[in-house]
Amino acid sequence: MAKVVVLGAGISGHTAALYLKRSLKKDHEVIVVSPNSNYQWVPSNIWVGLGLMTPEQVKFKLAPIYKKNGIQYKQALAVSIHPEGNESHEKPFVKIKHVSEDQKDQEEEVEYDFLVNGTGPKLNFAATEGLGPDKFTNSVCTYDHAAHSWNNLELAFKKMEAGERQSFLVGTGHPMATCQGAAFEYILNIAFEVTKRKLNHLADMWWISNEYELGDFGMGGAYVKRGGYITPTKIFTESIFKEYGIRWIKRAGVTKIEKGIAHYENLEGEYLTKEFDFAMLIPGFAGAGMKAFDKNNDDITSKVFVANGMMKVDADYTPKPYEEWSAADWPSIYQNPDYDNMYASGIAFAPPHTMSKPMKSKNGTPITPTPPRTGMPSGVIGKIVAENVAHRIKTGKNEHPHKASMAKMGAACIVSAGYGIRQGQAAVMTVYPIVPDYDKYPKWGRDIKHTVGEVGLAGHWMKLFMHYMFLYKAKAKPLWWMIPE
Ligand SMILES: Cc1cc2nc3c(=O)[nH]c(=O)nc-3n(C[C@H](O)[C@H](O)[C@H](O)COP(=O)(O)OP(=O)(O)OC[C@H]3O[C@@H](n4cnc5c(N)ncnc54)[C@H](O)[C@@H]3O)c2cc1C
């Protein structure tokens, strides 16, 4: 009987665990280790951050779902990986620390035959002084953060209703932050709510971002087909911002926050500030911070993980100039190069480099978005990793029939503003492939037939529909596997 341990029960890890169990049935063990007893559908946290959904609507308890599906669940934090075992373990193992009330702080060593690391990002607020919900800015990265953000946003709305002017600042809170899409969606929604309350005359809406041009989204921007015309995402995004009355600061690396003041450096090397009453800024992402040790208990963390803690996989990490980047640099099976029974899926894997052209300020500070790893690729990667591991267990062969390179995979991004059936609209963008490939698509970097942008009510319905559909799937309800990632 093989034992597969999945670390993390987010979009990627949870998807992997469900597919693993579906394929391996009772013949093999699947164990999930994750500290939060809830699953959360992260994309809907935006609505929690606007008071339009409650945290209860975007989360559910994992334990009953795992019990029903024959998956073991340990509410714990993975602390270190020991891929060679050690003097007390013949097999590789993970050291975990329990966080549940009844087992709090107890350590356990869980052996595995295969390991799937789906620990997602560590929200690295500490990398920017003063950033985060415990300090001076808000976040919508978790349902707790989003609920807290709504409390502060509601306060700002109340002040405006009493005639007080408010300044909103939304975007990236670190020179190398990613996830611009989530911040973009949040600011559009704030603007929508301001208009709904007829408070536009009292609102200063500002976007701040490390993107060289608006619409970069960490994927080097894109050309999209819109109403028969080819439009750069720069124009697409700028026109949406104009329509919503949002002004912008681009090429800006936020380095420090004080109460009501964001300090940033721009590519010109200027050190500037922007005042705000309400700010929601996305932090830098890092890996979960696990360590790794060999059989002699020597630290091999730098062999298994890159410097920011994300796990090395089958990518080409050779440092090379932007001009030499290729689609082939991107991983396709997410297997660790040194330990072939270890995989990293979702945000936990280390990309080979950014997708956007790396930029530095005149003072040498890198100010560039890191690559986005949205829900769709995170889910797809979780699924193919599970299918490959199941294949290896069943056949005994180290082969990988399922591949999912982000340079060969498309993604859809729906940025919805407004809420309900009749109110609201969404900007829908599909890109194919996610990583631009100028060798294959020399003109636009992507297949222009499948790289499309539209704005309208239909996209907004899709976003609502996706909320219910993906929660249904994550709850492993009947025929869940027929719903695509
Ligand atoms: C506000 C917001 C809105 C978004 N909107 C969209 C959208 O509209 N569309 C879209 O496609 N994508 C969206 N995304 C991105 C999407 O949420 C991510 O791509 C996705 O969550 C990544 O999945 P993951 O499994 O890699 O990480 P996560 O979903 O973050 O899951 C990581 C899991 O690992 C667990 N974990 C952490 N540390 C440890 C540890 N040491 N040991 C064990 N477990 C650990 C965590 O508790 C969690 O369960 C959005 C993101 C944000 C923040």
Image (tube, rainbow, N blue to C red):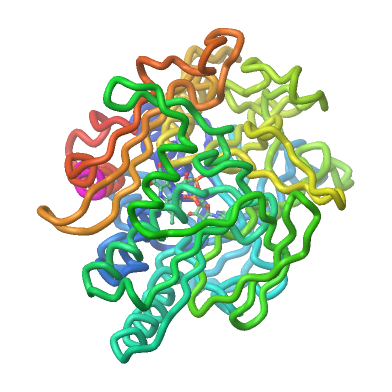
Q: Main secondary structure of the magenta part?
A: helix
**108 or 12, which is in the foreground?**
12
On screen, residue 157 versus residue 109, left or right, reads left
Please report the residue visible at 69 percent of the width from the left and 54 percent of the height from the top. 175
Q: Position of residue 324 (x, y in %)?
A: 75, 17
**186 or 463, which is in the foreground?**
186
Can residue 59 be seen here? no
**416 or 141, which is in the foreground?**
416
Can residue 242 be seen here? yes
**351 or 138, which is in the foreground?**
138
Q: How many marks?
A: 0
Query: Which segment is the magenta one?
Result: 462-467
232 versus 137 height, above or below: above
Q: Quadrant of the C terminus?
A: top left
Q: Position of residue 80 (x, y in %)?
A: 71, 52
Q: Is residue 465 magenta?
A: yes
Q: Is residue 474 magenta?
A: no
142 versus 354 height, above or below: below
Name the image quarter holding residue 477. Answer: top left
Please report the residue visible at 69 percent of the width from the left and 39 percent of the height from the top. 311
Q: Position of residue 4 (x, y in %)?
A: 52, 37
Name the image quarter holding residue 64. Answer: bottom left
Q: Position of residue 92 (x, y in %)?
A: 69, 39
Residue sitting at the far bottom: 162
On screen, residue 285 versus residue 30, left or right, reads right
